[in-house]
Image (cartoon, helix red, strand yellow):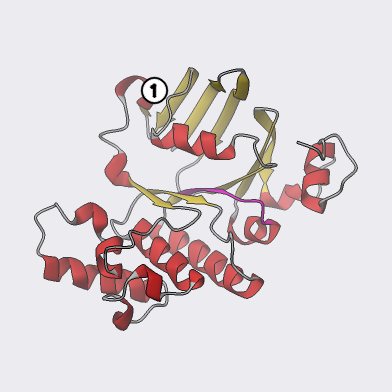
Amino acid sequence: MITLSGITKTFGYNAVLRGVDLHVDKGQSLVVIGGSGTGKSVLIKCIIGLITPDAGQIIIDGQDVTRSGHDKLLHRFGMLFQASALFDSLPVWENVCFRMLRSGQSRGDLRDLAAEKLRRVGLGPDVADKFPAELSGGMQKRVGLARAIAADPEIIFFDEPTAGLDPILAGVINDLIREITTEMGATAITITHDMSSVHAIADQVAMIHDGVVQWHGNIGALDQTDDAHVLQFITGSATGPIPTLR
């Protein structure tokens, strides 16, 4: 579904991506790990078209978007942002169906759709007319997930989906993500530092280090690898090839 070849991106003198090669099969869940500032978010922004890479090729479902652009594919994407990114001035149901508000569908039908997606993430119909400020952080994250799946996308991106959540809520969100993506048959790319999320969500894992893919393999091989960079990251060790002062 997604193939990256030689993706580079430099900001000023900072070479963030130095030649990323990556492949994600249709229906697979890939989790990208790596230290802070290693380019994980930049990589996702390149894939969805928010940032244009300096060089390389991005092919999504056979279409070279580095040449033709992303416009024809945007309706196939969904995204859960790190801080949920809800619109404070809109009620929850309008947040969930935001991308469809100008589609010509009746507001009543869209509100019903929102209520169904909220139900799918474990929120009752009473939440639909509340405003984001009236919700807890965990509920806001669920609303963000409901928005990400509202249009039944084929490809979903998750940016630090459990950031700021306690371990119990993080586990709930991880389970929801896995359930929903499997149910929808969606291709998913997640970036996270949370190793519990990695084990709960991933089919495949890729580690970004120094602007390239340091390691890529099945989730089952992650704990068996002898790659020193991966081992240091997944164990949280201060000793290893990754500098602790960055």
Observer-nearest of 25 and 226: 226
Residue 229 position, x and y percent, is: 80, 38
Identify residue for label 1: 66
Left or right: 156, with 103 as reference point: right
> Residue at the location (33% across, 62% down)?
88
Relative to 29, is 18 above or below?
above
Q: Secondary structure at mark 1?
A: helix
Observer-nearest of 42 and 146: 42
Residue 225 position, x and y percent, is: 81, 43
Relative to 193, is 10 above or below?
above
Is residue 192 one of those drawn in magenta?
yes
Is residue 13 visible to the viewer in this orientation of the structure? yes
Please state, as top left, top right, bottom left or bottom right, where the C terminus lies in the image: top right
Tag 1: Cα neighbours inside 10 Å, few (<14), some, or many (≥20)?
some
> Residue at the location (24% across, 52% down)?
99
Residue 20 position, x and y percent, is: 59, 26
State the residue lying farthest toward the right.
239
Is residue 208 one of those drawn in magenta?
no
Magenta highlight range: 188-194
Left or right: 11, with 245 as reference point: left
> Residue at the location (20% across, 55% down)?
100
Residue 33 quadrant: top right
Left or right: 11, with 51 as reference point: right
> Residue at the location (55% across, 68% down)?
175
Is residue 227 visible to the viewer in this orientation of the structure? no
Inspect the image, locate mark 1, and give the three-letter code of the amino acid beneath it.
Answer: Thr
Relative to 184, is 172 above or below?
below
Residue 36 position, x and y percent, is: 67, 42
